[in-house]
C-alpha cells in the first residue's frame, strides 16, 4: 500500500518538475532570441554593406528551409 502511494507521489513530482522545466526553458529561449537580435544588429552594423547582404541572404535561406522542414 505504501509503495503505491510512493509511486503516485513520485509521478506527481515528475509532472511538476516537467512543467517547471518547460516554463524555465521557454523563458530562456525568449531571452536568447532577444540577445541574438542584438548580436546580429551589432555584427551587421560593423560589416560592409556588400558582406551584410550575403549574410542576410544566408539567414533568410536558412529560415526558409527551416520553415519548409528541410
Image: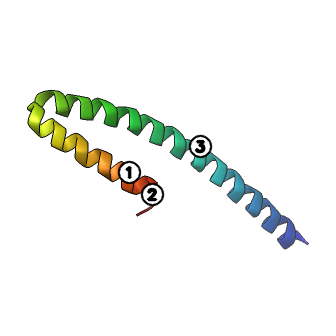
Local crowd size for mark 3, using a 10 Å CA cut-off: few (<14), some (14–19), many (≥20): few
Up the image or down, 44 lies above or below 10; here it is above
Q: Position of residue 24 (x, y in %)?
A: 55, 43
Identify the residue position indicated by label 2 in the image.
68
Q: Is residue 27 left or right of residue 47?
A: right
Q: Residue at x 24, y 40 (%)?
A: 56
Identify the residue position indicated by label 3 in the image.
23
Q: Is residue 4 left or right of residue 29?
A: right
Residue farthest right in this picture: 1
Q: Residue at x 58, y 49 (%)?
A: 21
Q: Position of residue 68 (x, y in %)?
A: 45, 57
Q: How many marks?
A: 3
Say if mark 3 contacts mark 2, CB within 8 Å.
no
Q: Foreground residue, 29 or 20?
A: 29
| Label 3 secondary element | helix
The earlier-in-sequence mark between 3 and 2 is 3
| Label 2 secondary element | loop
Local crowd size for mark 1, using a 10 Å CA cut-off: few (<14), some (14–19), many (≥20): few
Q: Residue at x 47, y 40 (%)?
A: 28
Q: Position of residue 42 (x, y in %)?
A: 21, 29
Say if mark 1 contacts mark 2, CB within 8 Å.
yes
Residue at mark 3 to residue at mark 1: CA–CA distance: 27 Å
Which is closer to the viewer, label 3 or label 2? 2
Residue at mark 1 to residue at mark 2: CA–CA distance: 6 Å
Q: Classify the position of the C terminus by image quarter.
A: bottom left
Q: Position of residue 62 (x, y in %)?
A: 32, 52
The earlier-in-sequence mark between 3 and 1 is 3
Identify the residue position indicated by label 1 in the image.
64
Q: Residue at x 37, y 49 (%)?
A: 63
Amino acid at each position: 500500500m505504501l509503495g503505491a502511494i510512493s509511486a503516485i507521489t513520485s509521478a506527481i513530482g515528475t509532472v511538476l518538475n516537467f512543467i517547471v522545466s518547460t516554463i524555465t526553458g521557454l523563458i530562456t529561449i525568449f531571452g536568447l532570441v532577444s540577445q541574438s537580435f542584438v548580436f546580429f544588429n551589432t555584427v551587421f552594423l560593423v560589416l560592409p554593406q556588400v558582406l551584410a547582404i550575403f549574410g542576410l541572404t544566408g539567414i533568410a535561406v536558412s529560415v526558409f528551409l527551416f520553415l519548409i522542414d528541410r
